[in-house]
Image (spheres, rainbow, N blue to C red):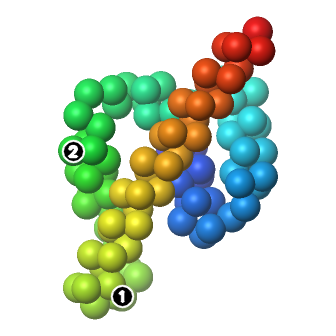
Amino acid sequence: MIFGLIVQLILEEKSDAEVEKLVNQIDELGLPISLEQLGIIDNLPEKITVIARAVDLKRVGLDRENEENLKKNIEKAIQKAGVIGRNHKRLSIVKS
């Protein structure tokens, strides 16, 4: 669930600095900041698509086309969040 906050900031087009600040805070708490830490390792594109498609957008009240566009944006945001988290972990290891 906490990883979803990173995705949400990306969807809201928050600045890289804001996203990185959240990632740092989450990492300091020892919570997952990457897809790998969530156990999502193999077949990433397929699994990300499954996750994005599972998001319930009925309450948002979008037409079919806009719903599909939003789900594609969610996929992209999950991918970006995964990259940010993975890179953050790599940098943390290098700095140690």
Q: Earlier in the sequence, mark 1 or mark 2?
A: 2
Nearer the observer, 16 or 26: 16
Tell me which residue sits at (72%, 45%) in the image: 20
Residue 85 lies, in percent from the top left, at 57, 35
Q: Amino acid at mark 1?
A: Gly
Secondary structure beneath disc 1?
A: loop
Quarter of the image with the C terminus is top right
Which of discs 1 and 2 lies nearer the camera? The answer is: 2
Residue 28 lies, in percent from the top left, at 75, 27
Q: Which mark is residue 46?
A: 2
Residue 95 lies, in percent from the top left, at 77, 15
46 sits left or right of 18 in the view: left
Which residue is under mark 1? 61
Position above or below: 8 against 42: below
Quarter of the image holding residue 38? top left
Tell me which residue sits at (61%, 21%) in the image: 90
